[in-house]
Each structure stands twice: as structure tokens, then as C-alpha cells.
Image (cartoon, rainbow, N blue to C red):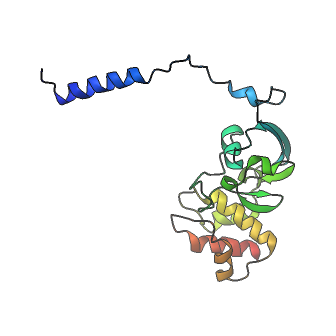
Amino acid sequence: MTLSRRGFFGRTAASAGSMLVPATPVVPAAPADSHAAGAARAPGEVTVVLRLNGKTTRLTVDPRVTLLDLLRERLRLTGTKKGCDRGQCGACTVHVDGRRVLACLTLAAAAHDRTVTTIEGMSDGDRLHPVQRAFIDCDGLQCGFCTPGQVMSAAALLREGRPRTDEGIREAMSGNICRCGAYPNIVDAIKKVAR
């Protein structure tokens, strides 16, 4: 019997599929709200209390969960971006106790009982933070993917009072990558707020 190429792959896929059937019944996933306040804690989970964007938030989390995944996946604060997930691009920059940190390299449990500010917490209602306004005025963004991390870094370094020259600003912002190349405009935005 001669099999066509399509027939061969069809039979191979069918037989491989039968080997993938689990020997034990599949247990349905826990409902999405199983980690809500007051829900039973799974073995190994830890309680984390954050002062997040001005509000106290209490959660139970796996101790291996990063702050980035907690913000994006559990709390739906998707302004903080997941870029490289290795601490190399700066897209996930947030403030913890006023200092800029890379949320992809920070465990959520390490932020317990600390103040966390994300890009969503920078504005005051409809009134933008001065750095956000300067990024718009100076056209310091193109695709916008890196912009939240850039804004968070810029706000922190301005608060630190460090940058005074173009070179100093570029050095202080070197952990934040803009693949669109809006660097000159980002520097202009930071200088505008610094003035």
C-alpha cells in the first residue's frame, strides 16, 4: 500500500494524538476569582499587600510570580509593558517606594507592604503628569510600546535631580530602549520638565 504525503502525515498525527491522551482525568482550572480576598490560599502561596497607585491591594500569590505578571495578568494594569522579560529593555519600569525598578525582575512578594506606582497612577484624573505632557509636546514617542517605561524612568530620574546635560540624561535613561529611535525627543521632553 502506498501512502500519499498527506495520508502519511494524517495517520502520524492521528496516532500521536492517541498517545497524548492523559491517563488520569483532567481537573478543571480554578476559577479566575479564586485568588480574591478571603479565598482559600493554595499551598505555598503568600499574602502580598501593596499600596498600588494610591489604593491598598491585598492578594495571595505564588512566591515565584513577578511584579510584572501580577500587574498585567492578575490586576489588568496593562500599561506596564512586557518587552524582553529579562530586564534589558526597561519597558516594565515601575516605581517601588519612589525608586524605579524593573517589574520583570522583581518578585511580587518582594513588593509586600511597599508603595508601587505604575503608569496608570501617574496622572491625576484627566490631568497628565508633567513628564507625560512633555512626552506628548516634544513628540517623545512613536509606536508607544516603550513609552510607559520611559515616562516612569524619566519621572524618577527627575525626582532624583541627577540629569543636567544631554549626555547625563542619556546615561540615566540608558536602561530604557526605544526601538523607534525617539531618543532626541525623549531627551528634549526630560529637559523641558527639568526647566
Could you say which is closer to the camera, residue 166 or residue 47? Answer: 47
7 left or right of 132? left
In the picture shown, does residue 53 fall above or below 194?
A: above
Could you say which is closer to the camera, residue 121 or residue 110? Answer: 110
Could you say which is closer to the camera, residue 115 or residue 195? Answer: 115
Find the residue positioned furthest to the front: 23
Q: Can I make out residue 89 in this image?
A: yes
Residue name at image x 61 percent, y 19 percent: 27
Find the residue positioned furthest to the top: 25
95 left or right of 72? right
In the picture shown, does residue 137 fall above or below 13?
A: below
**Quadrant of the frame with the N terminus:** top left
Residue name at image x 69 percent, y 74 percent: 172
Q: Position of residue 186 (x, y in %)?
A: 62, 70
Residue name at image x 80 percent, y 37 percent: 59
Q: Can I make out residue 124 in this image?
A: no
Residue name at image x 76 percent, y 66 percent: 156
**Quadrant of the frame with the C terminus:** bottom right
Could you say which is closer to the camera, residue 89 or residue 157? Answer: 89
Rendered image quadrant of residue 91: bottom right
Rendered image quadrant of residue 167: bottom right
Q: Position of residue 2 (x, y in %)?
A: 12, 24
Q: Position of residue 84 (x, y in %)?
A: 56, 56
